[in-house]
Amino acid sequence: MTYPIEVTLASTERPPHVIEVTMLKGNLKRLDGAYRMEPQAGGRVLLTWTGVVEALSMPPLLGEMVMRSNIEDQVLGMVREIERRDSLRREREAKK
């Protein structure tokens, strides 16, 4: 079961380890929080989310299922964007 979550977010980078997000518009009641990136051994990065996500009125079990099914997509999208920006930064630095 899926429920499309459509939101427009404002994000603020707080280098080197935080990206804050706030919902500007969308079909959720509220979405505010931050992603934190912590370097780990072996070149890995631990990405954690802290925040508030309030869905529209749904039965509790359905609301939980919908949110769980969308969280992975949100995190993967954020990781792809972080990697894209890091790649661009590295390319610029290599040209110097």
Image (cartoon, rainbow, N blue to C red):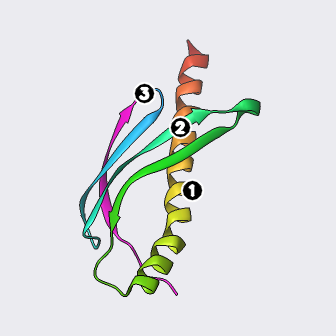
Q: Nearer the viewer, mark 3 or mark 2?
A: 2
Q: Residues within 10 Å of mark 1 (few under 14, many from 20)?
A: few
Residues shaded magenta: 1-15
Q: Of the residues shown, which amino acid type is indicated by label 3?
A: Pro
Residue sitting farthest toward the top: 96
| Quarter occupied by the C terminus | top right
Left or right: 38 in relation to 34: right
State which tag comes first along the sequence, 3 or 2. Answer: 3
Q: Report helix, strand or loop for mark 1.
A: helix
Q: Residues within 10 Å of mark 3 (few under 14, many from 20)?
A: few
Q: Position of residue 23 (x, y in %)?
A: 27, 57
Circle 3 residue: 15
Left or right: 91 in relation to 43: left
Left or right: 89 in relation to 12: right
Left or right: 13 in relation to 30: right
Q: Residues within 10 Å of mark 2 (few under 14, many from 20)?
A: some
Q: Is residue 19 placed above or below 69 in the rendered structure?
A: above
Circle 1 residue: 76
Cβ–Cβ under 8 Å for marks 3 and 2: no
Residue at 58 percent across and 26 percent down: it is: 91
